[in-house]
Image (spheres, rainbow, N blue to C red):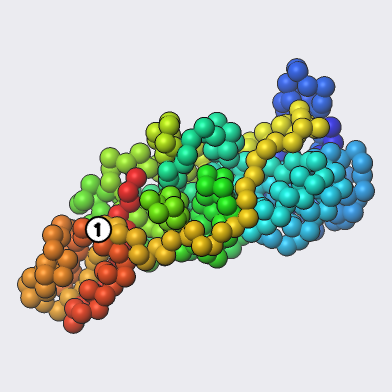
Amino acid sequence: MNIAVMGYGTVGSGVVEIINKRGTKIVGKSSPCELSVKYILDLRDFPGDPNAGKFTKDFNKILNDESIKVVVETMGGVNPAFDFTSSALKAGKHVVTSNKELVAEKGLELLSIAKENNVNFLFEASVGGGIPIIRPLSVCLAANEVKSINGILNGTTNFILTKMISDNMSFEAALKIAQENGYAEKDPTADVEGHDACRKICILAALGFGNHVYPKNVHCEGITKIMLEDVAYASSYDSVIKLIGTAEKLEDGKLYIIVSPAVVKLSSQLSSVNDVFNAVLVDGDEVGEVVFYGKGAGKLPTASAVVADVIDCANHQDTRRLIGWENENPDIIADYKTIPNQYYIRLMVEDYTAVLPKLKNLFGNIHLLARSGAGTHEIAFITEKFTETDIRNKLSTLKGSDLKSLIRVANC
Ligand code: HSE
């Protein structure tokens, strides 16, 4: 079976490499299909590449070639990926993508176009890189009502935080290594500001809770304000700081969905997920907690998930996979500022001794934290459960203090 790969970057080149390496064997004896990459669409030139002869800059060549049954979209971004994907689906070709932005922004539309044209739009690689999570969540856990999904969903930021925690490495140095390893997005702002993780939790929320969730409706904070001081305080609390995506069904039926750094206790299964690894912790009403773990970014791990989707299309060319969700319902998204949570707070204060009773007065029980070299003007503590609105209101009454960090404590 002929396929076309659109976008010959980190993931696309990995897809071609795996298919070239495994070729016919990969599909298995039960299938009459063989996989062969016929076209690689990319505007760049790749002199000396062993796939010379397959490159094209013309999408219509792929669209008009009836022998192309599956199109792989690994270009990234919404445009022109959306136009190419929708045209390919309308032309009766299955499309497989690793593009989380495309799925988070346009998934509803593309799934509907796929349905109308009786083809598949598959996106296992869009969340968690090589980790199987899309099918498990939508197929294997289908008997459950999902209570919550919590995940470390971005390899780049997890790599950076791990280096900061374990090696005391600076943010910039760790980001540089992540870029060299092909983990980071073209513009790493999407990683470090949490947008990439946000797209992924939106996709998981849609699968888990049934309605499309647009990233613009989700509160999202990145890791750029995390300091080594915060890492040290978290460590004194037997915790680590991780970028966590959360989607949780509340008692009133609303959805609490957020991406932010979180103080994660060492007893949590997510605390030991390090480097480029991702993990998704799903809590289902029947199954309890299940964790999906593996490499969340990088060429071959991500390509492995893409190629698996291609194989699925090859083996089920006339069958539709029933993966999907309903329209968005913005009314079900809860205001994150009104959800009570424990918080870690770090302040610079003029007078530690004078501020302490005021803090106790404002927050009741606080758990004071210590780190070596803190000096007498820094104070850090963990609160009991308050809403973010309450916390900020209380802190605004504290004169002569400067809020350095406000980080939620993870509930997973
Ligand atoms: N930049 C992404 C990450 C790539 O670091 O997780 C995988 O989606």
Amino acid found under the numbered disc labelled 1: Lys
How crowded pointer 1 is (Cα within 10 Å; few <14, some 14-19, many 20+) is rated as some
Rendered position, 257 above or below 151? below
Residue 102 can be seen, yes or no: no
Q: Quadrant of the C terminus?
A: top left
Q: Nearer the viewer, residue 187 or 112?
A: 112
Position of residue 167 in the picture relative to residue 47 (left or right): left
Q: For numbered disc 1, what is the local secondary structure?
A: loop
Name the spot of residue 307 as percent of width and height, x first.
69, 36
Q: What is the total number of numbered labels drawn onto the structure image? A: 1
Point 20% across, 52% down: residue: 236
Task: Indicate the quadrant where residue 316 lies.
Answer: top right
Point 43% across, 32% down: residue: 286
Point 15% across, 57% down: residue: 367
Position of residue 375 in the picture relative to residue 128 (left or right): left
Name the residue tied to disc 1: 385
Name the residue at the front extreme. 252
Name the spot of residue 114 as percent of width and height, x first.
76, 46
Q: Nearer the viewer, residue 269 or 184?
A: 269
